[in-house]
Amino acid sequence: MSDDQIDPTSAVEYMLRTASRHAKAKAERVYLEQFRKSKKAILMNDCQEKTAAAKEQYAYSHPDYLQLLDGLRVAVESEETLRWKMVAAQAKVEIWRTQSANNRGVDRAAA
């Protein structure tokens, strides 16, 4: 197959194969975003300081919170990588569709 030929079947098969991985990555990211709020509340509750500002500072600087943020970063990277691969596969199908329509037009003009 030359560089200018696109196999739409392969692109669609890729989308079907990776759909569940993309969904799982998105679910992980959303979970971590929501859990981040709960973790902050738990850590603030654990803090012995009296002021809300001190409790918040404790929560945001706590190693558990920072570890959660690292996990969120990884989850977003994974989701975005899979999402852009899906976008690329969809674009391949659209390019193939356009090329096919153009080829039909050329064939009609030549006939």
Image (cartoon, rainbow, N blue to C red):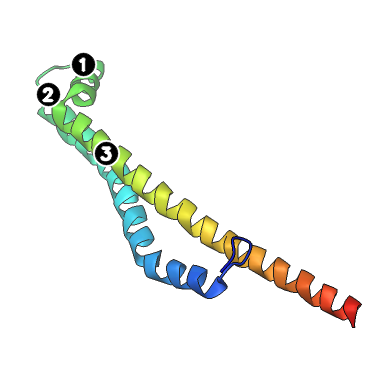
| Mark 3: secondary structure | helix
Q: Please tell me whether residue 25 is drawn above or below residue 103 in the rendered image.
A: above
Spot occupied by residue 110 in the image (x, y as percentages of width and height): 89, 78
Q: Where does label 2 land, which residue?
A: 47
Q: Residue at x 48, y 59 (%)?
A: 86
> Is residue 59 shown above or below 100?
above
Q: Which residue is mark 3?
A: 36
Asked if the residue at tag 2 contacts the one at tag 1, i.e. Cβ–Cβ closer than 8 Å, the answer is: yes
Cα–Cα span, label 3 and label 2: 17 Å
Return the x and y of residue 101 as percentages of the image width and height: 76, 72
Badge 1 element: helix
Q: Nearer the viewer, residue 82 or 29?
A: 82
According to the image, label 1 marks what residue? 54
Residue at 77% x, 73% y: name it.
103
Q: CA distance from mark 1 to mark 2?
A: 8 Å
From the image, which quarter does the C terminus lie in? bottom right
The type of residue carrying mark 1 is Ala
Quadrant housing the N terminus: bottom right
Pointer 2: residues within 10 angstroms few (<14), some, or many (20+)?
some
- In the image, residue 67 lies at what x, y percent? 19, 34
Residues packed near mark 3 inside 10 Å, few (<14), some (14 to 19) or many (20 plus): some
Closer to the chain start, of discs 3 and 1, is 3
